[in-house]
Image: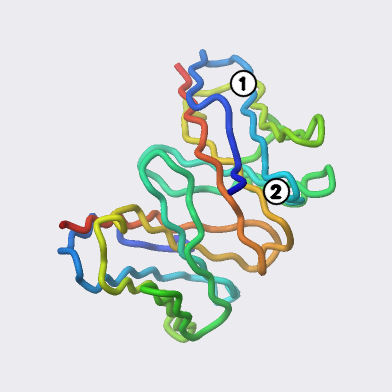
Amino acid sequence: QKEVEQDPGPLSVPEGAIVSLNCTYSNSAFQYFMWYRQYSRKGPELLMYTYSSGNKEDGRFTAQVDKSSKYISLFIRDSQPSDSATYLCATYTGGFKTIFGAGTRLFVKA
Amino acid sequence: EPEVTQTPSHQVTQMGQEVILRCVPISNHLYFYWYRQILGQKVEFLVSFYNNEISEKSEIFDDQFSVERPDGSNFTLKIRSTKLEDSAMYFCASGQGTWSTDTQYFGPGTRLTVL
C-alpha cells in the first residue's frame, strides 16, 4: 500500500469554480500535512500546512485533514487560470523525510 | 525575494560517469535537502543535511550518492557512477529551522539525463 495516494487527474474546471483536491494516506503516525503547488518546469512551492486534524484557511485556499479516515483535502475557491498547476499533497512523521503524493494536474479554463 | 538556485538546468551524461549537481541555498538557511522526481512520478526525498552532516537519508540514497557543502554557500549532490535509472529532475531545497514550523524552499531543479 502506498503511503500517500493522490489521483493524478487531470482535473479541468471553468474559472470561478470551487476545486476539491484530495489525498489518502496509510500511516496513522503522520502528523503534518502539506499542500504544494508546482508549476511546469519549477520546483514545488509550499501552499499550506496543517498539524493533526482540522481546517486551515488562507485566502482562497482551505486545507482540511480528517485523521479518522486518513483523508486530506485542499479546496480552492473562485479558481483562476493562474491556479493551473500540479498540486502535491505531502506528509511527514517528524524528522526530515517528506513523503509526497503523485500530484494532481489542475487546469482552470478562462 | 531570495531564492534557491541550481546549476546546471540540464545535464546530459553517459552511463557510468560521475555528475555533480550544484545548489545555492538561501543564505541564512541551515537545513538543506535533495529530492528527485522521475518523469511522471512523485517527488521523492533523497537526503537532508544539517550542521555539515547528513541528518536523514532515504533508501534511494545509496553509496553512489554523496552530498557536500564545500564552501558555506554551495550544496552539492554527487552521483559517482550514473545509471540509466538516475535520469530524473533533481530538486534542492533549503529551510531556516525545523521542518514543522518552517517552509522548505525549492529550487527550479536540474534535469539529469543519463544515456
Give the vertical position of A40 relative to B15 (above or below): below
Give x and y (percent) for residue A45: 49, 54
What residue did someone put label 1 on?
B19
In what quadrant of the picture does the C terminus of chain A appear? Answer: bottom left
Q: Please name the residue shown 32% across and 68% down the image.
A: A21
Q: Which structural element holds mark 1?
A: strand
Would you identify the image quadrant in which residue A42 lies?
Answer: top left
Disc 2 vs disc 1: Cβ atoms closer than 8 Å? no
Q: Which structural element holds mark 2?
A: strand
User: Which residue is more in the foreground, A60 or A98?
Assistant: A60
Q: Chain letter of disc 2?
A: B
B101 on left or right of B89: right
Would you identify the image quadrant in which residue A107 lies?
Answer: bottom left
Q: Please name the residue shown 68% across and 58% down the image.
A: A96
Pick whichever of labels 2 and 1 is earlier in the sequence: 1
Marking on residue B29: none
User: Which residue is more in the foreground, A24 or B107?
Assistant: B107
Label 1 Cα neighbours within 10 Å, binned few <14 / some 14-19 / many ≥20: some
Q: Chain letter of disc 1?
A: B
B3 on left or right of A71: right
Q: Please, what is the three-letter code of the amino acid marked with disc 1?
A: Val
Q: Please, what is the three-letter code of the amino acid marked with disc 2?
A: Ser
Marking on residue B48: 2
